[in-house]
Amino acid sequence: MDEPMPGTRSIPPFAFLPRFCAERSAAIGRCPQEGMRGTKEQLPRSFVRATRARRGFALVGTIAAAGAWSMPAAASDGVLEINQTCATQTGCFAGDTAGLPVTINGSAGRSYRLTSDLVVPTENTDGIQISTDTIRIDLAGFEIRGPVVCSGTPLTCVPSTGTGSGVEANVATLSGISVRNGSIRGMGSFGVFLGIQAEVTELRVSSNRQYGIYASVGSTVSGSKANLNGTVGIYAEFGSVVSGNTAHHNGVSGIFVSSGSTVSGNTSYQNGDDGIVTGSGSTVSGNASTLNGGDGISANAGSIVSGNTVRSNNFFGLFLGTQAGYRENVVTNNTGGTVSGASAVNLGNNACNGSTVCP
């Protein structure tokens, strides 16, 4: 099969675009993989990462008496609090000990809220690490902040290596984790790395060395902003919904999704390569993709691409796989051409460089 199986972390799965590669090589002498600032060797380690050794924790009378652990800080609504003081000095709740990352194993509860910024000391340190399903984290407008800075053209991140993420699910099978309402920047690896059926809402992720947001199979990413991340701004696996986001000035793609996903109402601009990339059988509608270093929208076989505005990208406006359909798009001023895809189907009402005649 031409796409990675769910639950693997060899990402982004540029290998799942063999038809694109062959077609683009024939058309313009360039595969999607070629000439990219983020290569597979630079991208994340195996998705099924060995679970990190957890710090020992024993709640015994002598430790409690010595004040080595304090009772969980909980708001009146039962939400457990996380802040810099408890994270670094005492541990914030049962299952967590002093020092970052804050570790959540679910024994203290399912819902958590930041009550201050979290400052992460090194590029190899996580902010919050989760080891159980069905956890809700509200950043409450606060920020998880690491030391990495990404800047320049082409985009370069310093330090150039690192393993730390802002919020991370530590095994691939974790499901139902929600992160919302805050900022994550400067992490050594991902801003957010979550498992299946995750929900990411109203996050601002920037200057993270690899991905801004990574969410696995069947996830939802909405209302978020991703910029200046070293590779991909927003990535979601098979069957996900990515809507109402903005991705710009990321090192490779702005938005990248696997097969059977829905990408709608997003804005993607001035990314290093393609603005929006989708796997086969996806729905791509109502997006704006402009001034990207590659194609405006690159959609794999059997996808429907409709109602998008695609302008001034460095390659094609629309780069479509076999049996893809497109309609009601406005495609203008793209350097490589308007639409590429010999077996794509023009369903009508497209405007290409001011003409109703599109390839």
Image (cartoon, rainbow, N blue to C red):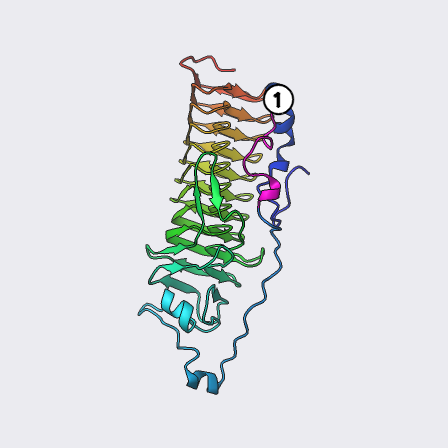
Type of the residue with mark 1 = Gly
Whether residue 93 appears in magenta in the rendering, the answer is no
Q: Residue at x 55, y 21 (%)?
A: 340
Name the residue located 60 percent from the left edge and 50 percent from the top edge.
45
Residue at x-position 60% and y-position 31%: 34
List the single residue furthest toward the right: 1
Give the class, few, some or many, for how many residues have Cα within 10 Å of label 1's Cα (few <14, many ≥20).
few
Query: What is the x, y in percent for residue 260?
Result: 55, 39
Say whether residue 183 is left or right of residue 171. left
| Coordinates of residue 92 in the picture (x, y in percent) | 41, 70
In this picture, which residue range is highlighted in magenta?
30-43
Tell which of 48 and 41 is nearer to you: 41
Expressed as whole percent of the image width and height from the top left, the position of residue 285 reads: 44, 32
Q: Considering the numbered disc 1 on the image, is that residue within a helix, a strand or a loop?
A: loop
Name the residue beneath numbered marker 1.
29
Image quadrant assignment for residue 244: top left
Image location of residue 145, percent across then percent down: 40, 54
Taken as a whole, is the magenta stretch helix, strand or loop? Answer: loop
Quarter-of-image position of residue 27 = top right
